[in-house]
Image (cartoon, grey):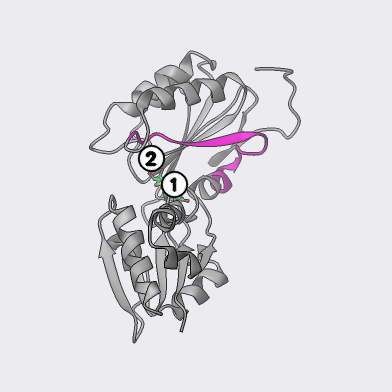
Amino acid sequence: MSGHLAVVGLGPGDSSCLTPEAETALADARALYGYGPYLDRLPPRAGQTRHASDNREERGRAAAALRHAAQGVRVAVVSGGDPGVFAMAAAVCEEIESGPESWRALDIAIVPGITAMLAVAARIGAPLGHDFCALSLSDNLKPWELIERRLEAAASTGFVIALYNPMSRARPWQFGAALERLRRHLPPSTPVVFGRAVTRADEHIDVVTLQHAAKLEADMATLVIIGSRETRVLARPGKLPLVYTPRASAEPSA
Ligand code: SAH
């Protein structure tokens, strides 16, 4: 029997956001690997083993899952959101590249999921309705100077920006520094969406302006969308506003 490794996206939280394809991949697996809280989202299944690991141990987790799959077992590694977005799919590819030749013969399936920026955007309108980019604010795997350059390039050329990993206990100042960079290129009135724990019981959405964004708390469960100069906010009585970026760009350059 040849080994099989599925890298499965669980979506942003609620099980209704899990795709049928992901459900099938999870049901078919004999062993599940993942960050403990993600595994906890899944109901126990008879005959399936679970291998929880810490958030930061992505390469070690990927290697362990590949070793297990190489024994001829059907293995699934889980990721929150989409596994290809700042998550396990790239870690698995990195391990295959540097691992034993035999790992290249394994069946690998990447099963997509709803990534956080799409879940947050859908809650509030269509902030990603025109050109946008996604950036992780974590400087664990890249230098902070590079993050600042990318923020400035994105803001100054008119991209809406989805910020993943805005803040953690180990990275307390980076989000404030990022906002400061963005204020150099964008008007104070630029809309900013904070989407926290979207589709989970403690979901919370805030819409503010860039001017006031530093007053809000972001954490590891928050995704922040920074609008462009064209992003609009439509107030609605008794409801969250609709934040959207029109499909046609009026500006030749931002
Ligand atoms: N693979 C994941 C992203 C991993 S990086 C995905 O595709 O969504 C982790 C970051 O994702 C968090 O710091 C946060 O910015 C964002 N995130 C994940 N789930 C979220 C949720 N339910 N609500 C808001 N942001 C979320």
Q: In which quadrant of the rendered view does residue 33 lie?
A: bottom left
Residue at horizontal 52%, vertical 59%? 113
- Residue farthest to the top, as pictured: 184
Query: At which x and y percent is residue 79?
Result: 41, 58
Say above or below: 244 vs 12: above
Query: At which x and y percent is residue 25?
Result: 49, 74
Q: Is mark 1 within 8 Å of ligand 1?
A: yes
Q: Where does the C terminus fall, quadrant-wise?
A: top right
Residue at horizontal 35%, vertical 76%? 31
Q: Is mark 2 within 8 Å of ligand 1?
A: yes
Single out the mark in the foreground, 1 or 2: 1
183 or 51, which is in the foreground? 51
Query: At which x and y percent is residue 5?
Result: 45, 70
190 or 87, which is in the foreground? 87
Which amino acid, mark 2? Asn
- Residue 165 is marked as 2
